[in-house]
Amino acid sequence: MKKILIIALLLNCWVAAAAQEQLSKKQLADKLFERYEYFKALNLYLPLADKNNPNVRVVERIAECYRLINDHKNAENWYASAVAYDKAADTDLYYYAESLLRNNKLKEAKVQYQAYYAKVNNPEQLRFKLATCDSAAKWMASPRKNYTVSLEKRLNSIYSDWGANYYGEKGIVFTSDRVIEYDESGKQTDNRTGNGFFKLYSANKDSVVLLPASSDGGKIFNGDYHAGPALFNVTADTAWITVTTSVPRNDLPIDKREKGSHQRLYTRRLMLVTATKANGVWGNFKNFAYNNIKEYSVGHAAVSPDGSSLYFSSDMPGGEGGTDIWYCAKLADGTWAKPANCGKTINTKGNEAFPVIPWNNGLEFASDGLPGMGGYDTFEAKGKKAEWSTPYNHRYPVNSTADDFYFLTMNGLTGYFSSNRDGGTGNDDIYSFKYESLPQPMKQILPPVIAGPAQPVFKPEDIHAIIYYDLDKANIRLDAASELDRLVLLLKANPSVKVKLASYTDVRASGSYNIGLSKRRSDAAIAYLVGQGISRGRLSAGWFGKENLVNNCPDRASCTEAEHQLNRRTEVAYDGVTN
């Protein structure tokens, strides 16, 4: 998956061909690895993993190659071998834990995370990773019942297929690295993965084909390197396309060398280009004003419905972490203002990418730094520019312990997302989702029968909800309203059921203040339910301040904002039936 914005490709090294012939197989494999040619390097490393004469560095490199080509099952096995060596690197423990998490071995992952973070002494990040494992276990055990997720077999191949975007009224354009025969000389492949370069494909109900060629001979869509994803306007005649720069290598700066390396490598970064279509042919390609291929990548465009704001992913300086979501405002003369960061509510020390503007003019995006299930999770936030509500995790079955990203919807009820979870046909796959506003089927919970031989069976856990609040606030957010609306439907279908609400705060502020704040939160949730037609007599409440924390977050200083968020909540649970 093109989840890492910086794409590195090979520049010819200084070493002469005659000298290379004298290199050992391991030296050749190491050089390929340095050049990001993991697929080729792996095939040289594997025969060197001699059980009778083990070399921990070879085992580590095999594990890394498998991880970097997204073969997580083999990565897990080889990291398990690597950590058994006395001279294994500490990071082997971390990536072993990551592989276990990715493969849904959550208890085993927690053990390895604890071992790694004990060595590097980072209790804050350990809490985050343990909470990730716990969230994954909890959400998979209780999936969102109003979501149906389906693998889109007509769009997917045995390769990597992702980044679906709407194309006109009924079409879809997506990105794929399926290998295409270009001429009799052979196939065009990416040495990093062994697959083709990413291209743009157009799909309708009958066929999947390469996006029609452009007026420059097709290189934007079918060129020497990666192209995609692409965003289109409603009439499908204007596009924002993410491409890997194809400028001559002599115009690119040489990367900083690894210790002991003599290779001269350069980085091909991502850039945004716009294009328009006339008479069925794409042309008029223009570079985005803030591309800077010598210093950072820019990609994954999303434009607000009114055209006034452009959002994108970038690792440009001034961000919060690896890659952030940025925006530009459109000026009166039609140009774009300088990029501004979307802020700490959206961006973290990790990576945020793949922004999409949904039907309700909020923001869909993927993050591996916000609380989730592992890898990239998809999130939704309300707001614009640098003012956002706390992001809402779409949870399972949309999210998983794998990478889940590029969540696309026009109406909030149906759409697509991409994932490299198990059960697909290739590396990354495109999934569709359907959201049912009413639980199907509607389950009625009846009061116990006082007399008679039979007792109706019901599950009190069906009446359950958790809603969250912004810092020092008691107002009902949009994500909380959606969860309470679901609860209202169940309560109206079961008019004898009562519920209790328990509200909490994070650990900041005094105990007495937090008791009052949690009471205001319970009052707000009750007022919302009553406003939706639920009798006040069916609702009881408690307020407990900073008691009953959901994570090991004992004080203000040692906890992240994401951890504090999980404690600012109201829990709603079954409380029996009326007489």
Image (cartoon, grey):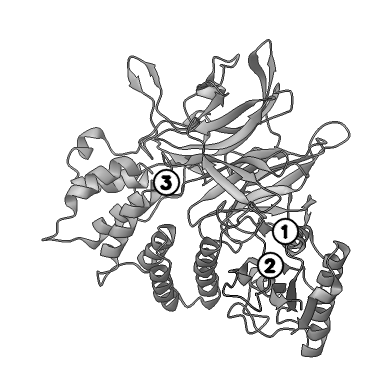
Total numbered circles? 3
In what element is the residue under mark 3?
A: loop
Q: Nearer the viewer, mark 2 or mark 3?
A: 2
User: Looking at this view, is 211 or 17 the one in front?
Assistant: 211
State the residue at coordinates (33%, 38%).
14
Q: Amino acid at mark 1?
A: Arg
Could you say where residue 35 lies in the image, as x and y percent from the top left? 37, 43
The residue under label 1 is 486
Q: Are marks 2 and 1 in contact (CB under 8 Å)?
A: yes
Question: Which quadrant of the structure image shows residue 360?
Answer: top right
User: Looking at this view, is 424 or 275 the one in front?
Assistant: 424
Could you say where residue 190 lies in the image, as x and y percent from the top left? 40, 34
Q: Disc 2 versus disc 3: distance between alpha carbons?
A: 30 Å
> Is residue 226 visible in this depiction of the protein?
no
> Is residue 166 visible in this depiction of the protein?
yes
- Side of 154 where 167 appears, left or right: right
Q: Earlier in the sequence, mark 2 or mark 1?
A: 2
Q: Earlier in the sequence, mark 1 or mark 3?
A: 3
Q: Are marks 2 and 3 in contact (CB under 8 Å)?
A: no
In what element is the residue under mark 2?
A: strand
Could you say where residue 573 lies in the image, as x and y percent from the top left? 68, 74
* Above or below, 135 relative to 21: below
The residue under label 2 is 465
The residue under label 3 is 423
Question: Which quadrant of the structure image shows residue 394?
Answer: bottom right
